């Protein structure tokens, strides 16, 4: 790794990292409670769910697509998992295990539908996932009879509160997912293909590849991530509900975009997504502590997204120049 | 000297790009009210000349005068304002709007802020009658056939009063009857004082409609003549010029072997004429023909990049089916596409990624990429092909054209296929890099690979190929072994598919 490559990587990720640090410093000064152990744990937990969804969303956006159905699919997965966990006929350990499995399977199946339909008939994923947004929500309400599912076994609730070395398990799992995803994207053939297809699908196709498989796979990965996120959410709330996750897709997309991934595809990283999700979580938490109301917080988050993308265009210009030397 | 004054004068006009001279000291006079035909081989500079006249290109040298005053349009808008309009080969129509909306796009008739559809359709109908297009003005353009779209484009040009009308291959898609109507329109425009510049590959049209003809060759003006005073063979000779100055030393030690691939019954549509030919080991097979004669379509169909109506392939004696590029590559066939930037490379990724993309299995283990191995392979290819890049991490976007082309070759060499199709391998590349590519091609042939080259550079193909197929109008017009290579013969074959069987006009057939 030479100096140039390091400075390239730093510039790519540093922008948001530095911004995050500055925001944290600002909030700590403005409201010391921000940096308290309890509050930080709160932030970690809040970021986790969005991060996991955003990891999957990153794969989709890297290929130039988008998944608007993640919030609804989250609800559907949680309802299926909830019903499995609370099923009388199953021993606790098996119930939890099956719940996790089913959650991921349901999420992946929705992703498979999204990916297959949008690619087979060449319809933009925006439209297909918009349809799935409604389908999944309706299915969740139908299956659960519009009722909240509660009464999870104690083992499950205890798991939700667990910490390892002082860090909540939920957060730890999100970080692990980011690490695994980063390894896949940077070190594997699959990851190489994702970036290549995102940059120039036709060129990759003409080099002798079946590009559709990768495009569908990205959506399946996104759906699987939603399945995981659903479990994490249940760990935190201790209930399942068909009305969960409304608006989650927007936070996930915001995390990906703030993190520097281009909506055109081909450029971006999971570390960036993680930092993007962190900024959103920190902002939300900090502003709340400072007494800002819900609406004002939403406005600020929106402004940050716009600012992040504008700064990104300047950053890309500098990055390109670095590449030329 | 001329009875009419000059409306456009080009004096020593040159247009250059890095490594390529598109126009070289062009001197040309277009007379007011004449029909001036422009001919020339592919790449001779016809499009560049038009782009200079209509404001897309600004010449590096020389001057253009319009009505005696200096004319230097900064954009097509300036040209249109000045009364110079171009009807392009590639249509500028909006498919989801109606014919009427397309024609009057720039000045839709209005009444109190709303579109005045009645007037719009009435005016459009008049124009459609004039060009002989019998469809309703409300028809959405996407429902029209190619020839009909061409007529809409012509009607559009008629709708605004132009002083100079430039028609780029207007008859390419028209039937004889539509062409007659078009020529009537042109004659009528002449009486109204409009000047017409007409580009065409159909040489006999020159005599039917042209007053004078100019021939471009290699970016230079080869000659301007009054059409009565020249014959088709003479025109062809002007287009071709002296035989090449540069040498393409043919390699005698390369021997062609047995047939490796048979292409049979290749048809793009149900009505196309079937195309059949063989490809042999150790042979450089050239495919010549005019732009649009079906060469690129044929090789893309064989490679599986496009889906033809039919294509039977026999590889090493066994029938194979190719439906996608993946099938082709697995069968040992590669294609260097005509457009290397958008289809041959991933511009925003490094050189080594671009090279190994054709065979990631070779640089990975259990799904994980072996970076050191990949870099070593990339460096080897970059050195062997003499690709100039500061390092292999460089994004391919920043390589020069010639080096980009070599990089595309590197990626296919890495795949090591037995059959290689090259579509315009040296287009836009400087002489030095071209020679390196020729040497590479010969080396591949020496190794027993089968190479098929589609190129518009006839001297180049004649210099390096063992055998040549000539395409004309989507079928094979002829096949020549090296001993019989002759520029005029090949060009005549290339044009043969476009010569209409007309018995009128002062047409003189060239020697076949």
Image: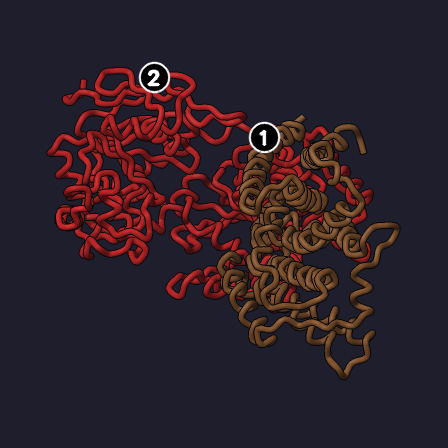
Percent x, y of residue B417:
68, 53
| Distance in Å between CA atoms under marks 2 and 1 | 39 Å
Residue B44 figure quarter: top left
In front: A214, or B415? Answer: A214
Q: Residues within 10 Å of mark 1 (few under 14, many from 20)?
A: few
User: Which chain hosts label 2?
Assistant: B
> At 33% from the left edge and 30% from the top edge, which residue is drawn?
B76
Residue at the farthest right position: A165
Quick check: A155 left or right of B394?
Answer: right
Q: Residues within 10 Å of mark 2 (few under 14, many from 20)?
A: some
Residue at the farthest front position: A291
Above-or-below relation of A220 to B215: below
Q: Nearer the viewer, mark 2 or mark 1?
A: 1
> At 17% from the left edge and 51% from the top edge, which residue is drawn?
B132
- Residue beneath disc 1: A314
Check if mark 2's residue and mark 1's residue have beta carbons within 8 Å. no
Residue A111 visible, this angle: no
Residue B505 visible, this angle: yes
The quadrant of the picture occupied by the N terminus of chain B is top left
Chain colored brown: A
Percent x, y of residue A133:
54, 63
Q: Are marks 2 and 1 on the same chain?
A: no
In front: B85, or B312? Answer: B85
Quick check: A153 left or right of B140?
Answer: right
Specify the label residue A126 is tagged with.
Answer: none
- Residue beneath disc 2: B63
Judged from the image, the secondary structure of the residue bearing numbered disc 1 is helix
Judged from the image, the secondary structure of the residue bearing numbered disc 2 is strand
User: Which chain hosts label 1?
Assistant: A
Colour for chain B in the figure: red
In front: B203, or B410? Answer: B410
> At 31% from the left edge and 42% from the top edge, which residue is drawn?
B169
């Amino acid at each position: 790794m030479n100096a140039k490559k390091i400075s390239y990587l730093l510039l790519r990720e540093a922008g948001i990292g530095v911004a995050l640090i500055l925001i944290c410093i600002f909030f700590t000064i403005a409201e010391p409670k921000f940096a308290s152990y309890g509050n930080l744990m709160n932030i970690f937990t809040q970021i986790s769910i969005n991060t996991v969804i955003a990891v999957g969303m990153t794969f989709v956006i890297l290929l130039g697509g988008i998944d608007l159905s993640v919030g609804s699919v989250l609800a559907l997965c949680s309802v299926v998992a909830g019903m499995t966990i609370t099923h009388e006929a199953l021993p606790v350990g098996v119930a939890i295990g099956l719940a996790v499995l089913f959650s991921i399977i349901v999420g992946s199946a929705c992703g498979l539908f999204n990916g297959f339909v949008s690619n087979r008939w060449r319809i933009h994923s925006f439209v297909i996932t918009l349809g799935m947004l409604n389908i999944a929500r309706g299915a969740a309400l139908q299956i659960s009879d519009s009722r909240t599912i509660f009464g999870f076994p104690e083992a499950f609730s205890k798991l939700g509160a667990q910490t390892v070395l002082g860090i909540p398990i939920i957060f730890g799992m999100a970080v692990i997912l980011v690490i695994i995803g980063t390894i896949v994207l940077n070190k594997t053939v699959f990851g190489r293909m994702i970036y290549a297809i995102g940059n120039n699908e036709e060129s990759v196709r003409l080099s002798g590849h079946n590009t559709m498989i990768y495009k569908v796979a990205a959506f399946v990965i996104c759906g699987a991530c939603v399945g995981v996120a659903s479990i994490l959410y249940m760990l935190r709330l201790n209930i399942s509900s068909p009305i969960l996750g409304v608006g989650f897709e927007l936070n996930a997309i915001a995390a990906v975009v703030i993190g520097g991934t281009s909506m055109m595809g081909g450029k971006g990283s999971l570390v960036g997504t993680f930092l993007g999700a962190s900024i959103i979580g920190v902002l939300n938490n900090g502003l709340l502590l400072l007494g800002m109301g819900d609406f004002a917080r939403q406005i600020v988050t929106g402004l940050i997204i716009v600012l992040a993308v504008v700064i990104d265009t300047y950053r890309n210009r500098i990055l390109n120049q670095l590449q030329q030397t | 000297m001329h009875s009419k004054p000059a409306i456009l004068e080009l004096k020593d006009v040159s247009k250059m790009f890095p490594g390529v001279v598109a126009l070289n000291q062009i001197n040309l006079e277009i007379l007011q009210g004449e029909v001036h035909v422009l001919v020339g081989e592919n790449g001779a500079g016809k499009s560049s000349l038009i782009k200079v006249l209509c404001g897309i290109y600004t010449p590096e040298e020389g001057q253009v005068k319009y009505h005696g005053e200096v004319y230097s349009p900064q954009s097509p808008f300036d040209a249109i304002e000045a009364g110079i309009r171009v009807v392009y080969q590639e249509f500028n129509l909006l498919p989801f709007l109606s014919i009427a909306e397309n024609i009057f796009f720039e000045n839709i008739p209005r009444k109190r802020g709303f579109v005045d559809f009645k007037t719009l359709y009435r005016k459009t109908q008049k124009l459609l009658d004039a060009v002989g297009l019998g469809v309703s003005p409300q028809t959405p353009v996407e429902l029209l056939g190619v020839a009909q779209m061409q007529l809409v484009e012509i009607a559009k040009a008629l709708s605004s009063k132009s002083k100079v009308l430039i028609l780029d291959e207007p008859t390419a898609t028209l039937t004889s009857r539509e062409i007659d109507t078009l020529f009537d329109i042109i004659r009528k425009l002449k009486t109204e004082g409009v000047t017409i510049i007409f580009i065409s590959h159909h040489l006999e049209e020159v005599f039917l409609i042209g007053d004078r003809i100019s021939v471009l060759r290699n970016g230079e003006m080869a000659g301007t003549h009054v059409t009565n005073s020249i014959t088709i063979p003479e025109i062809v000779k002007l287009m071709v010029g002296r035989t090449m100055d540069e040498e393409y030393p043919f390699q005698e030690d390369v021997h062609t072997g047995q047939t490796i691939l048979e292409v049979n019954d290749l048809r793009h549509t149900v009505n196309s004429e079937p195309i059949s030919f063989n490809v042999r080991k150790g042979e450089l097979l050239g495919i010549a023909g005019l732009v649009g004669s079906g060469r690129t379509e044929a090789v893309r169909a064989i490679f599986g990049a496009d889906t033809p109506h039919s294509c039977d392939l026999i590889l090493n004696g066994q029938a194979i089916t190719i439906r996608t590029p993946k099938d082709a590559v697995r069968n040992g066939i590669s294609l260097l596409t005509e457009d290397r930037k958008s289809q041959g490379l991933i511009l925003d990724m490094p050189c080594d990624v671009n090279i190994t993309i054709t065979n990631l299995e070779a640089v990975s283990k259990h799904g994980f990429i072996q970076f050191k191995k990949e870099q070593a392979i990339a460096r080897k290819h970059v050195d062997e092909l003499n690709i100039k890049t500061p390092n292999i991490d460089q994004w391919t976007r920043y390589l020069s054209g010639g080096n980009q082309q070599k990089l595309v070759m590197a990626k296919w060499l890495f795949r090591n296929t037995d059959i290689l199709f090259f579509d315009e391998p040296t287009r836009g590349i400087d002489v030095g890099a071209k020679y390196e590519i020729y040497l590479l091609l010969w080396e591949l042939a020496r190794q027993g690979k089968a190479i098929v080259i589609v190129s518009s550079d006839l001297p180049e193909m004649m210099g390096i190929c063992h055998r040549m197929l000539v395409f004309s109008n989507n079928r094979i017009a002829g096949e020549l072994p090296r001993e019989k290579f002759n520029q005029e013969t090949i060009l005549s074959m290339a044009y043969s598919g476009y010569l209409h069987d007309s018995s009128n006009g002062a047409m003189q057939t060239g020697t076949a």
